[in-house]
């Protein structure tokens, strides 16, 4: 006789932890001394620890003193750019692009992209990130790394109009080739770079391809206030209005940054016929000294989900989404002049379920609940910097650090246990990448892959 699911050994049981849960109104709560049962990569149940104490399992984790959170989602990054971490410092955006980053990127080989992606995935797994949305070049290499290391990813092959029609075609071919890859852990998107590097013809064609192939779009738009004001001065339209007139807002679109979103843009976003989301990466905005940040509260008021992001480590120096969560909460308080916004619970909601929604995975990940994919992290709060705990949400957002993540699990597979990475050999990656850096960083050729002129 075949045992019933309740009697058969589970794949993984986690006991003794406090679990972050969402109620039916999506409010954050915490279930203490809980047990999490995982089978087939899915959360089967969240129950009391005593209820599963004698239950058979292939693998067990005693998580006493730890908090189980949904894995963090990095909603916009350029993972391979970790290879450029620190090479373009203390520069305004135009010089950052034209004088350093785009000349270096003209040297990129697929191996550089692979090694950068491997190092980035190691950093994100160690920081409690279980899914990332990537927008870069040679993305076949990134997809291969994702499949091997076990993380989840939303991937797009970026293109500029300067590449001609072939750039757009490659973005589509990548999206169709890898959609559903890595056992379903890879989702894909079309990835025009931005309205200032992709013309109206390519944007309109991208929107049509997105509708024809049921693909989302991921691009930069209204990154900063200068771009919005430049668009108005030169063409009488904002970057968001460019997206509207070319049909991008009729698709499911993830807009990176949006610190230049103006009040006149909000009705367009609210009335878009596609699913619109925005990714905010506040650390980079501070580094570039931008005067505005993503208008999270205004977007919240019109029902636009805002996910947390890091951007690439070339601009942000870090892929730490935990830090992005803390900075988002603090900067929003300052920007709105209201210490009651964002609360710690709101920040945790942005870091989990809203970020999952931003990348189109809101029905799959983002919460720890029966039927959801088992993407979760265990956070140790026993350190002196997190004690005592009077308000658990505040402790997580404002006291805990990404280095407090002890265990990272994706699809029920443990990718890091007790801070030990199980799927990536970091020293080997660092050694090989280091050997390639002199050729990658050479700017003596005078080339650049694109010109920045917003």
Image (cartoon, rainbow, N blue to C red):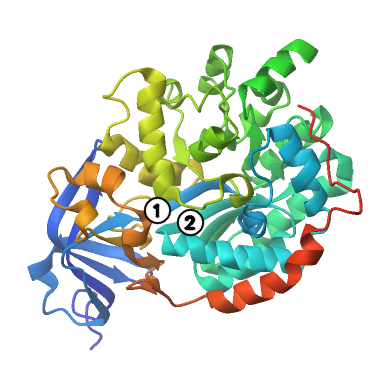
Percent x, y for residue 203?
A: 76, 33
Task: State which quarter of the image contains the N terminus.
Answer: bottom left
- Which of pointers 1 and 2 indicates the residue nearer the eye? 2
Q: Going by the image, does 190 lie left or right of 276?
A: right
- Cβ atoms at labels 1 and 2 below 8 Å apart: yes
**Residue furthest front in the image:** 90
Depicted 129 relative to depicted 437: above or below: above
Q: Which residue is mark 2?
A: 131
Decide if residue 149 is in sight here: yes
Depicted 433 relative to depicted 135: above or below: below
Element marked by disc 1 = loop
Q: Residues within 10 Å of mark 1 (few under 14, many from 20)?
A: many
Decide if residue 23 is in sight here: no
The residue closer to the viewer here, 411 or 116, is: 116
User: Which residue sits at x=53%, y=64%?
Assistant: 121
Residue 211 falls in image quadrant: top right
Q: Going by the image, does 71 lie left or right of 96?
A: left
Distance (Cα) linking label 1 and label 2: 9 Å
**Residue furthest left in the image:** 50
The residue closer to the viewer here, 227 or 206, is: 227
Q: Earlier in the sequence, mark 1 or mark 2?
A: 2
Residue 325 falls in image quadrant: top left
Q: Which residue is mark 1?
A: 365
Q: Residues within 10 Å of mark 2 (few under 14, many from 20)?
A: many
């Amino acid at each position: 006789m075949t045992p019933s699911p309740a009697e058969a050994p589970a794949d993984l049981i986690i006991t003794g932890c406090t679990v972050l849960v969402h109620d039916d109104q999506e409010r954050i709560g915490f279930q203490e001394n809980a047990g999490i049962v995982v089978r087939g990569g899915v959360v089967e149940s969240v129950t009391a620890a005593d209820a599963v104490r004698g239950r058979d399992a292939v693998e067990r984790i005693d998580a006493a003193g730890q908090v189980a959170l949904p894995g963090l989602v990095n909603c916009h990054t350029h993972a391979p750019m970790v290879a450029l971490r620190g090479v373009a410092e203390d520069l305004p955006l135009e010089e950052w692009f034209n004088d350093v980053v785009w000349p270096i990127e003209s040297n990129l080989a697929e191996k550089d992209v692979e090694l950068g992606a491997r190092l980035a995935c190691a950093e994100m797994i160690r920081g409690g990130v279980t899914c990332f949305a990537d927008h870069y070049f040679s993305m076949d290499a990134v997809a291969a790394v994702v499949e091997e290391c076990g993380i989840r990813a939303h991937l797009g092959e970026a293109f500029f109009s300067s590449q001609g029609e072939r750039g757009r075609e490659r973005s589509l071919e990548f999206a169709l080739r890898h959609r559903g890859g890595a056992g379903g852990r890879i989702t894909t998107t079309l990835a025009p770079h931005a309205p200032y590097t992709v013309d109206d013809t390519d944007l309109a064609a991208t929107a049509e391809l997105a509708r024809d192939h049921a693909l989302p779009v991921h691009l930069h738009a209204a990154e900063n206030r200068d771009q919005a004001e430049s668009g108005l001065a030169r063409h009488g339209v904002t970057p968001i209005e460019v997206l509207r007139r070319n049909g991008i807002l009729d698709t499911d679109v993830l807009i990176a940054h949006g610190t230049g979103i103006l009040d006149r843009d909000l009705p367009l976003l609210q009335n878009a016929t596609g699913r619109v989301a925005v990714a905010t990466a506040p650390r980079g905005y501070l580094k570039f000294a931008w005067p505005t940040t993503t208008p999270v509260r205004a977007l919240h008021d019109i029902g636009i989900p805002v996910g947390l992001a890091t951007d690439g480590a070339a601009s942000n120096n870090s892929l730490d989404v935990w830090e992005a969560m803390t900075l988002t909460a603090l900067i929003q308080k300052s920007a709105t002049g209201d210490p009651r916004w964002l609360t710690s619970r709101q920040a945790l909601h942005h870091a989990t379920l809203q970020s999952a929604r931003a990348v189109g995975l809101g029905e799959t990940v983002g919460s720890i609940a029966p039927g959801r994919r088992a993407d979760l992290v265990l956070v140790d709060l026993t350190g002196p910097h997190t004690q005592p705990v009077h308000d658990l949400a505040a402790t997580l957002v404002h006291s805990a650090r990404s280095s407090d993540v002890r265990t990272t699990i994706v699809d029920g597979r443990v990718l890091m246990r007790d801070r030990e990475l199980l799927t990536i050999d970091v020293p080997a990656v660092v050694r090989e990448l280091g050997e390639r850096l002199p050729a990658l960083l050479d700017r003596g050729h005078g080339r650049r892959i694109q010109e920045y002129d917003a």
